[in-house]
Amino acid sequence: MAEEFYNTFYNTFTSESSETSTVTPKAINENIKHDNFYGTHSKPPTLESIEDYTWWKERFINWAKAHA
């Protein structure tokens, strides 16, 4: 008798998975704040306020060195 093949990734991309994740507006907002504060691979940290320039400058320089 042939062994059955079990695709471990089958439920990952289908709606048949037993665990459903919901993305709340709060989670989206937290992710956007995190990306703006630390930056991503394709965009630097965002300067939210001119009062934050001194710490933002160092963070921006570090981001540029890491992704250059």
Image (cartoon, rainbow, N blue to C red):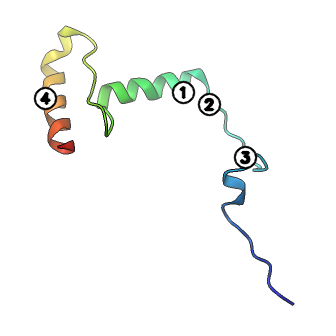
Q: Which mark is residue 27?
A: 1
Q: Amino acid at mark 4?
A: Glu
Query: In the image, is 19 to the left or to the right of 25?
Result: right
Q: Calculate the distance from the C-alpha at mark 3 to the C-alpha at mark 2.
A: 13 Å
Q: Which residue shows up at 77% across the image and 49% down it? A: 18
Q: Quadrant of the C terminus?
A: top left
Q: Which residue shows up at 72% across the image and 55% down it? A: 11
Which one is earlier in the sequence, the residue at label 2 or at label 4? 2
Q: Calculate the distance from the C-alpha at mark 1 to the C-alpha at mark 2.
A: 6 Å
Q: Calculate the distance from the C-alpha at mark 3 to the C-alpha at mark 1.
A: 18 Å
Q: Secondary structure at mark 1?
A: helix
Badge 3 local density, few (<14 within 10 Å), some, or many (20+)? few
**x and y, in percent, of residue 3 in the image:** 79, 84
Q: Is residue 36 above or below residue 21?
A: above
Residue at label 4?
58
Q: Nearer the viewer, residue 66 or 37?
A: 66
